[in-house]
Every structure is written in C-alpha cells, then in structure tokens.
Image (spheres, coloured by chain):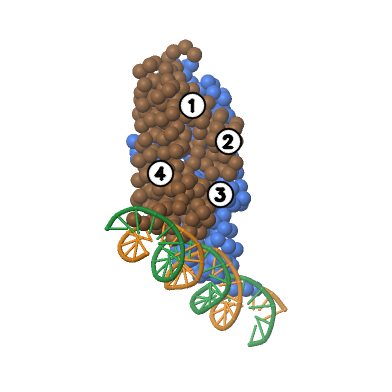
Chain colours: A blue, B brown, C orange, D green
Amino acid sequence: MARPREFDEAAVLDAAIDRFWLRGYEATSVRDLADEMQIAGASLYNAFGDKRGLYAKALNRYLDQTFRERIRRIEPTMPPREAIEAFLKEIIKRSLSDKQRRGCMLVNSAIESAPFDPGFLSIVAVFLDEVEAFFLRCVTRGQKDGVVTRAHSASDLAKSLLGILLGIRVLARVRPERALLEGLLRPVLGLLDDTTSPR
Amino acid sequence: MARPREFDEAAVLDAAIDRFWLRGYEATSVRDLADEMQIAGASLYNAFGDKRGLYAKALNRYLDQTFRERIRRIEPTMPPREAIEAFLKEIIKRSLSDKQRRGCMLVNSAIESAPFDPGFLSIVAVFLDEVEAFFLRCVTRGQKDGVVTRAHSASDLAKSLLGILLGIRVLARVRPERALLEGLLRPVLGLLDDTTSPR
DNA sequence: GCTAATTTGGAGCGACCGCTCTATAATATG
DNA sequence: CATATTATAGAGCGGTCGCTCCAAATTAGC
C-alpha cells in the first residue's frame, strides 16, 4: 500500500561499488554516489540508511559477486592443487586487465576503512577467514591426495597463500605488471609441490 | 635577515607521520595535523606548501626512518639468508606490537593515496623497487653461497618475498595475530631452502 | 635603530561535506 | 474514489574542508 521503488537495488549497488572500489570510502562523496547510482540523495538515504550502511552493503555484494563466486565456481570442479593455482591466476589476470587500477575492494577496505569501523572490520575479518578456510580445504585435500607437500602444515600453507593473495592485490593497485605478478606466483606454486616425490 | 622557524622540522614531520599513518590521507584534516604538530595552520602551509606536499614529505621520512634504516642496519651485518629472515621477522614483531593497528604507511599509501596522485605513486613505486632490489641482492648472494635454493630464479624469489611482505602488512592492519603472521612466514622461509641439499 | 624578510597566530573565505526536511508523486488497500 | 503509506526530487541545514589573508612578532644586515 505504498509507492514502489523506481530503481533496482542490485543495479544501484553495482554503481556504488564502482565508486567505492575506485576511490575508497573517504574520497567518495554521497553526491558522487547518488550521481553514479542515478538516484536522488533522499532515495539513497531512504534505501540504505547512511553512507556507512551503503558501503557495508556494497562491500558485501562485491565479496559475493567476485570472491565467493570464484570459490563456488572453482572449488567443486577442480582438483585441489589446480584449484589453488586457478584461483590465484584468475586474480592476477583480473589485476592485469584492471585499467583503472582499482585493485581489490577487500584489500582497499582492509587498509582504508576497516580499522576505524567495527562493522567494516567484521566484514573484512570474516571474509579473510573464509578465504583462509578455502585455501586450507584445498591444501588439506591436496596433501591427502599426495599432490601438495607435507613439508609444512596445511594450516601454515593456507596462511601463506592468504598472505600472497593480499600481496598480489596490493601490487595490482600500484604496479600491475605481468612480469611482476606472474614471477611472484611461480615460487609460491612451487612451494606447494611435494619435494620428497619426483618431479 | 628574517625571523627564524620556531619548530623543528623533523619533530613536526614525525607528528604528521603519526596522524597520516593512523588515519590515512583523506580522513586526516589539516586542522588535525596542525594540532598534532603544535603549529598554526599558516606555519604549516608556509613550511610545506599544502596538504599533499606535507604528506609526501611525511611519507618519505617514514620510509627513510623505518624501511631504509632497517635495510641499512641488517644487510651489511648478516649473511643473506639470515638478513631476509631478520627483515621479515622484525616486521612481524612490529606488526604484533602495533596496538593502534596502524599497519604500514607504505602499504596504506599504496592503497589509499597513491593511485590518484602521481607524486605519491612515484614515491611508492620507487620504494617498492628498492625493497625488491634488497631482496634480490640477498637471494642472489644466498644462491651464490649455496644457502638459498636455485629451484627458482633469484628474480622470482625476490618478487615473492616482496609480495609476502605486503601481505603481512595488510594482515597487520586487520588481523595482527601472532599465530597467523608467524605461521604464514614459515613456509616462505622454507621456500628459500635448497631442497636438493640435506636438511 | 631602522629596514627588509620571514614566521606566527587567528579570523575567515568559498566550497563541499553528510544528512534532513518539505512538498509532491505514485501505489495498495478499503 | 478516498486514504494511508512509501518514494522521489530538490532545497537547504549546520558543520567542516583546504587554504588564504592580515596584522603582529622576530630576526639579520645596514
């Protein structure tokens, strides 16, 4: 019994993601956002509460549409060692084709906006746990299958992979160079190989 | 033939570093800075030009006082393999004792302020090259001495170490946990070991 | 001690910030 | 159709932003 929304929430959220991803939280004004989302300021506040609420929704949607989608797509269809490699190589590919140098909204949030907002921090920390858990599942399965080294614990290897992932995404924003990112990855993938078995 | 400065430039720059390091570029106002530096706004503009000029000077001083100091201190006095380990472990130690979760001003700058300011970008990119070059010198010497693996090129290994360094510093801002950072490091240090020699 | 040069503190500029208010438009229900 | 309810557009709120101006203060050279 009321006037319906004139905009598609997913579509305007995508527009908000675009701005926040590129410029970060502080450097993006609500007017920038409203323009990009093609809605009036009042509609933005009516639908999302405030700027922080919009950012939280945008970040969650970003994580769903990029990282979680990638994990859902790769993990069930590939052997564990290949899944890790495909995951990281896909991120490098995205980094190299990112003409705007947006980097990774997760890392950008972790650095810029999470440290001073408990809500943002929670979103980021929980998701980092998810990624670590994904790597841990892959490494554990790989060790069981004998395709991943047992020279280190699965837990340590998963943490290293998480670290490398974040490092790649930092470099993507400043030095998105193929030689750098692909060179960086080679020793890490070699690290997974079981050195006690013949190559 | 003029009135002299009443403040010590290094001291007020340290105060500026404190604010920028903690809150980033956008979220720090010139009034915040002037308060922390204990000088008037006009003095700040007189001495540093504008906010961007102050940030550039503060970032350069940060890099000199932390990273470059660390390289100068460690590299000449340690064998290459130990130098790499000491460098990374020192950064983890600093990350774990960082109660304010400031993380790393280099990484914070790379993510937040460098992408849209050519001056900042240049400072960050040049310094990342310096760190990569430091790792490359260590790895090359280590390979020559037979204490670092030849399974990968020195160039690739140096890039991986750079990536891990950046990853550690991202995590330092969001999840500064000992088990995470130290666990992350173990496989990376193992990666340097020459797997063809006995352990 | 006078002049030229620079720094200092404080007031204040115009612009923009996040956000809200008001009036109007559009819908579901009775 | 009348009413209740929500969404919309736009004006505009108080506050803060980066920055500048100005008068007073402090120095070195003559």
As measured in the structure, the alpha-carbon distance from the residue carrying label 4 to the one carrying label 2 is: 24 Å
Q: Is residue A184 left or right of residue A152?
A: left
| Rendered residue at 44%/17% (across/down) | B195
Numbered mark located on residue B60 in the image: 4
Percent of width and height locating residue A128: 56, 41
Residue placed under numbered mark 2 in the picture = B96
Compute the Cα span from label 1 to label 4.
23 Å
Label 2 CA crowd tier, 10 Å (few <14, some 14–19, many 20+): some
Q: Toward the viewer: A31 or A8?
A: A31
Q: Which of labels 1 and 4 is toward the front?
A: 4
| 3D distance between C-alphas at marks 3 and 1 | 29 Å
Q: Quadrant of residue B130?
A: top left
Which one is nearer the viewer's eye here, A62 or B136?
Answer: B136
Camera-nearest label, 2 or 3: 2
A142 in relation to A45, above or below:
above
Q: Which residue is mark 1?
A: B86
**Earlier sequence position, callout 1 versus callout 2:** 1
Disc 2 to disc 3, how far (Cα)? 18 Å
Task: Name the subunit of mark 2.
Answer: B
User: Residue B23 has which mark?
Assistant: none
Dot 4 falls on a residue whose secondary structure is helix
Q: What residue is rendered at 47% in x and 33% in y?
A: B164
Q: What amino acid is found at the position of numbered circle 2 in the picture?
A: Leu
Disc 1 is attached to a residue of which chain?
B
Q: Are marks 3 and 1 in contact (CB under 8 Å)?
A: no
Amino acid tagged 1: Ala
Instruction: Label 2: state its secondary structure.
Output: helix
Using the numbered discs, state the Cα–Cα distance from disc 3 to disc 4 in whole angstroms: 25 Å
Q: Amino acid at mark 3?
A: Ala
